[in-house]
Image (cartoon, grey):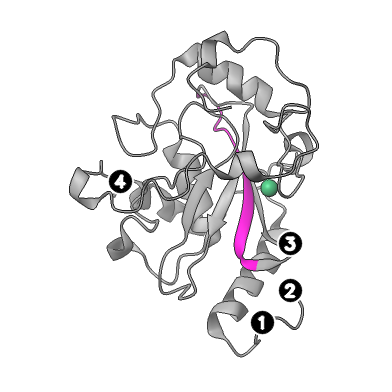
């Protein structure tokens, strides 16, 4: 990302600052980094919240920053099978591109990640991009997720997060109120939901035998057969 972007551009400055802070923070709950060839596409990993069906899980995904960032919100999609969010589909949180009216430029990629973590255990209730898998299916996916490798950035979930717990920062207290703004989509507002779902995974080159991102192709998929891998 050196020399390709103007350092005078406010958005670029802001994104590089966020990348620096998140790397330095080395958080227990999440990690995120811009792709080497595109500052506006990030990949992230979040830890499944303790005490939920997702405990022990590590989930990877993409964050797409608009050229107007931070004045317009990022969009987010998951790549690791999780049973809560569909893969390769922009998910519906009030703070993402689906509800730009809620977005505030003071928020950042950390805000998004913390809101998604807080949002993970909520019920999907038919929302766009939401999945209502059973507890057993989600727990199985959580266990398997540690062996998942990103076909794009090669991040291995088993070592994608810091193992050191740290004191939560004060700013994180804002997160639940952000997540509460979530609402189910109705048909009239679902304009962009199908744009790229389920296509990229078939195009990407991958080091894995079955192209799904698993380090070891799982032997038991009966319980999760509706997932798109
Ligand atoms: Zn990745």
Q: Cβ–Cβ below 8 Å for labels 1 and 3? A: no
Q: Cβ–Cβ below 8 Å for labels 1 and 2? A: yes
Residue in the image at 60% along x and 13% along y: 221
Looking at the rendered structure, the secondary structure element under dot 2 is loop
At label 2, counting other C-alpha atoms closer than 10 Å, the crowd grade (few under 14, some 14-19, many 20 or more) is few
Q: Quadrant of residue 35?
A: bottom right
Residue lying farthest front?
203
Looking at the rendered structure, the secondary structure element under dot 4 is loop
> Which is more N-terminal, label 3 or label 2?
2
Q: The N terminus lies in which quarter of the figure?
A: bottom right
Marks 2 and 3, how far apart at CA: 18 Å
The residue that label 1 is drawn on is: 5
Inspect this view and state whether residue 46 appears: no
The residue that label 3 is drawn on is: 24
At label 3, counting other C-alpha atoms closer than 10 Å, the crowd grade (few under 14, some 14-19, many 20 or more) is few
The residue that label 4 is drawn on is: 182
User: What's the mark number on residue 1?
Assistant: 2
Residue in the image at 66% along x and 28% along y: 145
> Which is more N-terminal, label 3 or label 1?
1
Q: Say whether residue 29 is left or right of residue 105.
A: right
Residue 197 highlighted magenta (yes or no): no
Q: Say whether residue 47 is left or right of residue 218.
A: left
Marks 4 and 3, how far apart at CA: 30 Å
> Which is more N-terminal, label 2 or label 4?
2
Q: Quadrant of residue 215?
A: top right
Q: Say which of marks 4 and 3 sits in front.
A: 4
Q: Say which of marks 2 and 3 sits in front.
A: 2
Looking at the image, which is closer to me, 13 or 196?
A: 196
Inspect this view and state whether residue 91 appears: yes
Marks 1 and 4, how far apart at CA: 34 Å
């Amino acid at each position: 990302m050196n020399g390709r972007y103007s350092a005078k551009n406010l958005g670029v400055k802001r994104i590089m600052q966020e990348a620096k802070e998140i790397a330095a923070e080395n958080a227990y709950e999440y990690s995120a980094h811009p792709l080497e060839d595109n500052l506006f596409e990030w990949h992230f990993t979040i830890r499944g919240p303790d005490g939920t069906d997702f405990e022990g899980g590590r989930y990877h995904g993409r964050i797409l920053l608009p050229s107007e960032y931070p004045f317009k919100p990022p969009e987010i999609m998951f790549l690791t099978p999780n049973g809560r969010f569909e893969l390769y589909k922009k998910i519906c949180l009030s703070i993402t591109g689906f509800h730009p009216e809620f977005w505030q430029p003071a928020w950042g990629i950390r805000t998004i990640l913390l809101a998604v973590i807080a949002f993970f255990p909520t019920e999907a209730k038919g929302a766009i991009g939401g999945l209502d898998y059973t507890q057993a299916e989600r727990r199985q996916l959580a266990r398997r997720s540690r062996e998942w490798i990103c076909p794009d950035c090669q991040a291995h979930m088993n070592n994608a997060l810091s193992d050191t717990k740290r004191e939560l920062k004060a700013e994180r207290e804002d997160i639940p109120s952000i997540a509460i703004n979530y609402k189910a989509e109705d048909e009239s507002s679902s304009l962009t939901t199908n744009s790229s779902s389920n296509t990229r995974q078939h195009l990407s080159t991958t080091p894995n035998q079955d192209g799904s991102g698993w380090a070891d192709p799982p032997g038991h998929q009966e319980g999760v057969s509706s997932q798109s891998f």
